Amino acid sequence: MTKADERKCSNCGHAVKMADAIIVQKVGRVIVFLCADCQQAKKIQVTLEKRDGEWYFSQFFPVEA
């Protein structure tokens, strides 16, 4: 896996292959990457805020053990 093929998970910060991630886009712009571990959480909350015309995520529920 090359650096071009991976991104940082928006929830836990670990490296994730783009092919394995859940990717959330808004108006053609990628705003969230979720790794396989965070995808296995029972609840994932993505809270989006629009500030100054740009979309930002503000929180996620933590991964449940």
Image (tube, helix red, strand yellow):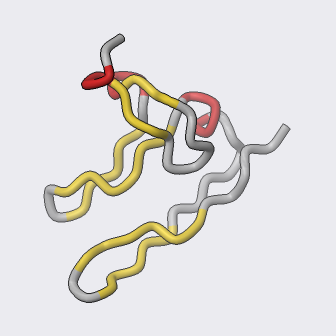
Classify 16 as above or below 53: above
Residue farthest left in this picture:
28
Residue farthest right in this picture:
65
Classify 3 as above or below 63: above
Question: Which quadrant, please, contains the N terminus?
Answer: top left
Classify 53 as above or below 28: below
Which residue does the image show at 50% across and 41% down from the upper left? 9
Which residue does the image show at 62% across and 39% down from the upper left? 38
Classify 20 as above or below 56: above
Q: How many marks?
A: 0
Residue farthest top in this picture:
1
> Which percent across, then down, holds residue 19?
34, 22
Which residue does the image show at 80% across and 44% down from the upper left? 64
Residue farthest bottom in this picture:
52
Q: Is residue 21 left or right of residue 12?
A: left
Which residue does the image show at 27% across and 54% down from the upper left? 25
Rendered image quadrant of residue 18? top left
> Which percent across, then down, holds residue 34?
49, 41
Q: Nearer the viewer, residue 6 or 30?
A: 6
Rendered image quadrant of residue 36? top right
Q: Is residue 49 left or right of residue 40?
A: left
> Which percent across, then down, holds residue 47?
50, 70
Question: Which quadrant, please, contains the C terminus?
Answer: top right
Q: Nearer the viewer, residue 16 or 38?
A: 16
